[in-house]
Image (cartoon, coloured by chain):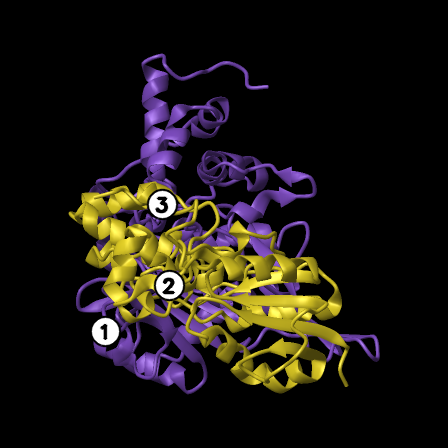
Chain colours: A purple, B yellow
Amino acid sequence: MSTGYILANDAFRDWLNILRNEFTVIGPVLKKRGPIVFEEIQDAGDLHLDYCSTMLGPRKFIYPPTQRLFRIDNQNHRVTTIEPADAGNAVIFAVRPCDMQAISVLDRTFLGDIEDFYYRKLREETLTVVLNCNRACDAGFCESMGAGPFLRLEDGYDLEMTSMGENYLIEIGSRRGEGLIEKAVHRKEAASGDYETKDDLQRKAIASFTKHLETAGLPELLMRNLDHPVYRETAEARCLGCTNCTMVCPTCYCYDIEDDMSFDLTVTERRRHWDSCQELHFARVHGGNFRSSREARLRQFVTHKLATWVEQYGCFGCVGCGRCMTWCPTGIDLTEMAKRIQQDFETGRARWWAYS
Amino acid sequence: MGTGKRIGIFKYSSCAGCQFQLFYFQHYVLETIQAVDIVYCKMLQSGGEEDGPFDLALIEGAITEQWQADQLKRIRERSELLAPIGSCAVCGGVPAIKNTAHELDAQRRVYEDISVVHSLKAHPVDHYVRVDGYVRGCPPGVRDLAELVKSLLLNKTPRFLDYSVCVECKLEEAICVLVAYQEPCMGPVTNAGCGALCPSRGRACYGCWGPMKDANAKALADRFERMGLGREEIYRRFTEFGEPTVEWKPGQVKP
């Protein structure tokens, strides 16, 4: 949408406080000992907008780590759905473009052919305000993955913010977003010069990237080199199987189901919680485990994010946020693994024949 | 209204904290007592039916004497299910620190007169008998204990937590002390259940819950070495809890 507004920094803070009367306002907050965490803010001053990336993305509000699904009354044989808690009236501020892209990637999983009731409810009732990145973060390569540093999505978000020094340019992404910005008292319509400033900032941001990944032909290359030694070597020397990568990944969607019964055996509650393909139990089925080696599990992570996701959902499963390599205790970098296979292909050491 | 399920609780070399954890059981204490019959438990009542039979035998502590091993085998044969509870029974725990020294030296350090000491190396319960699950923790986790008792009542296979401490640490959104502060954190190779008690408060995990299944101890030991930790230090971290385990053996590089 074309209409945009300019909000001075002071007016922005006033606007947040106005919104707090009506909404649960969530944003990045600097915590004791240093982490920056998405949580509800009590005052506009709590918001820590000058951040690169949080450990867990805003995904946790739309797809929570643990979710109660339904309750079974064993005596009366009744099943009661448990609606997602705290649904409605939440606005998440300063969602980075990569995280917004990640939510749209999750949409393809949960709102695709089979719709997930719990996800839809939280997704629909949570508003998202994107904050564009004026510079690249150290581990980020969102530019290569088509997810940043400025928002690349056409829809699925509510507002887009760009920090322009003394003020913010705020562009509308949805009707509900429009409703939010209309509550800002001292807003003024953006002029063409403001959009030019934004374009300049975007160009500068793109130029600041040091990390790149060539994605053309990558899915095919990875699928033809499933037995490349990089997986075995990395899995043996460095992969701890700790699942940090999948915990922090903003597009990981796997969950496990758990039934919890009361001690008197009268009530059962069914829950789901985040699961990880890096865990040994993940691929355990009747008769065995089809990913019993750490090598197989690591390959699953890399090839799913950078190859099979494309076949499955028509987009990459990686948005280039760099969380997995930042929080990996041994610094395993999936782009380095992909690059090694690319280099081996260039020097004729990796395959390019039909994979059967 | 009991279900008539008979539980026996046995203690070997340990601090007895696991049994206390069982009695407290936090908000489950009444439900547990009503649901099962505790037919043998020295910390709770004198006497009791030492010879079973048991629907479930809970074993606390490491095996460090021959009579313990003998009794354990007898219990196994009279129990439908048997599970070690707590780190000492699951992976050797604190008693197994002595495995890193010569037996005589370890005994001499503590006792003046060793003629009455018949101690052997400390071993976890599963070195002697087959077990039906592990309730990890120091003290054992309430979640896994409840799961075990409920599974007994439901006659189902219990599902214990089997992932690393990192999972719980991430959910706490605590800054990673290994990545950010270069602390020698054992979290990545340690089984979860504690709720990342230490790392989420800025302190490195020292592995008291014992090894996670399929842990890559060698890779973490190498990481510690690259951080500048000496071999002595690395050895200590991997032998403080769980010296006898196969999972942590590759990390136990002799200094």
The three-letter amino acid code for the residue at tag 1 is Ala
Co-location on one chain, circles 3 and 2:
yes
- Say which of marks 1 and 3 sits in front: 3
* Label 2, residues with CA under 10 Å away: few <14, some 14-19, many ≥20: few
Q: Residue at x 32, y 21 (%)?
A: A343
Q: Residue at x 32, y 41 (%)?
A: B219
Co-location on one chain, circles 1 and 3:
no
Q: Which quadrant does the N terminus of chain A fall into? A: bottom left
SS at mark 1? strand
Q: Nearer the viewer, residue B191 or B247?
A: B247
Subunit under mark 1:
A
**Disc on the earlier residue, 3 or 2:** 2
The three-letter amino acid code for the residue at tag 3 is Ala
The three-letter amino acid code for the residue at tag 2 is Val
Q: Is residue A274 above or below residue A188?
A: above
Co-location on one chain, circles 2 and 1:
no
Q: Which quadrant does the C terminus of chain A fall into? A: top right
Find residue A68 and report its image quarter.
Answer: bottom right
Q: Nearer the viewer, residue B25 or A310?
A: B25
The residue that disc 3 covers is B217
Left or right, A264 with reference to A160: right
- Say which of marks 2 and 1 sits in front: 2
Residue A8 is marked as 1
Q: Residue at x 50, y 14 (%)?
A: A353
Q: Residue A147: x percent and y percent?
A: 38, 47
- Say which of marks 3 and 2 sits in front: 2
Q: Is residue A160 in sight in this rendering? A: no
* Label 3, residues with CA under 10 Å away: few <14, some 14-19, many ≥20: many
Left or right, B167 with reference to A141: right
Q: Residue B245: x percent and y percent?
A: 43, 49
